[in-house]
Each structure stands twice: as C-alpha cells, then as structure tokens.
Image (cartoon, rainbow, N blue to C red):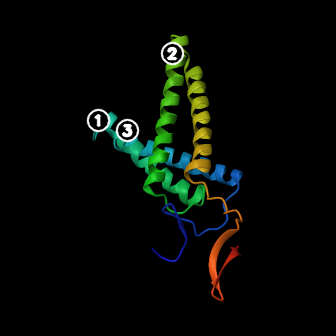
Amino acid sequence: MNNRSRVAGQDTTNSTAPGTVASFVRFVAFGGGTGLASSAALVALNGTLPLVVTNAVVTAAGTVLATELHSRFSFRAGRANLKAHVQAGGSALVAYLFTTAAMLGLHAVQAAPSIMVEQATYLTASGVAGLARFVFLRLAVFARPKAASTVTATTRTRVLGRDALVAAA
C-alpha cells in the first residue's frame, strides 16, 4: 500500500467531497450512461445467448461498472472495494424488486393499463428507486468518515522518577 490515506479499502486522496447537487448530477449522468450502454449491449448480444442469461450478465456488468464510476466520480471516494460493490449491488437488487412490485401492483389494480400508464408507473418507480439508491450510496456506501472529535486522552508518564498524569491532545 502506498503512502496515500486509505479508509475501508477505498482511496481517499481527494480531500474534498463533492456537494450533494454535483454528486447527484454525476450520479444521474453515469447511471444513465451505464443504462444506455447496457441497453446497447443487450441488443448487440441478442441471439448469442438466451435473453435471461444475456440480461443477467449485462445487468451484473453494468452494476459493477456503475458502482466503480459512482465511487470514483459521483462521490469522489476513489476505487470501490468489494464491500462497496456488494452494497451497491444489493441496492440495485432492492431497486429492481421495487420497480417490479410497482408494475405488478399496477396490473393487480388495472387489468389492461395503457402503455402510457405503464410507462408512467415504471418511470416513477425507477425515479424513486434511483433517488433512494443515491441517498443510500452517498450516506452509507461512499460516505466519508467524520473528522475525529477532539478528545483529551490521559496518559501516564514518568517525570523525574515520579508518575504524573499528562493530558495529550
């Protein structure tokens, strides 16, 4: 390991965290870009493997790529470690389950919704899930450690053959 500071396996050489709005704009850009790239890959791989397998591979690869991009650029936390990838993957799974539940719920209350209603439901659920993922990733996965509070520690030292208590700052 080099002399740069590392926290929980993540490179934290950039000392200033981006603001919330800047992080969110980058989160949307990188997440959306990865989604578009995944869509293109799905089309390109069409017919080479069964759709379910292709979708799983593309989704997993897209999630790993997006997590790395979010770690490095959206949240400026350096390279993502395995724990961050697992947590981000878990949040993607929760988002998938949320959007799936929204679509199943729509079809439970309306037998044949129009394409506009389906799209509005899916996009709304995706937006809510994406916002929740952003908050989770920013506050839990790629959060910077808070500065240590100034606590005075007491240590015992020998002064001229006698024990004395010294406050260390």
Q: List x then y, in percent, for residue 37.
A: 47, 48
Q: Earlier in the sequence, mark 2 or mark 1?
A: 1
Q: Quadrant of the C terminus?
A: bottom right
Q: List x then y, in percent, for residue 22.
A: 68, 54
C-beta proximity under 8 Å, tags 3 and 2: no
Q: Earlier in the sequence, mark 3 or mark 2?
A: 3
Q: List x then y, in percent, for residue 36.
A: 50, 45
Kind of residue at badge 3? Asn
Q: Hey, which residue is sitting farthest bottom in the picture?
A: 160
Q: Nearer the viewer, residue 114 or 53?
A: 53
Graded by Cα atoms within 10 Å as few (under 14), some (14 to 19) or many (20 or more), the crowding at tag 2 reads few
Q: Nearer the viewer, residue 159 or 96?
A: 159
Q: Which mark is residue 107?
A: 2
Kind of residue at badge 1? Pro
Q: Which residue is mark 3?
A: 55
Q: Which mark is residue 90?
A: none
Disc 2 from disc 1: Cα separation: 26 Å
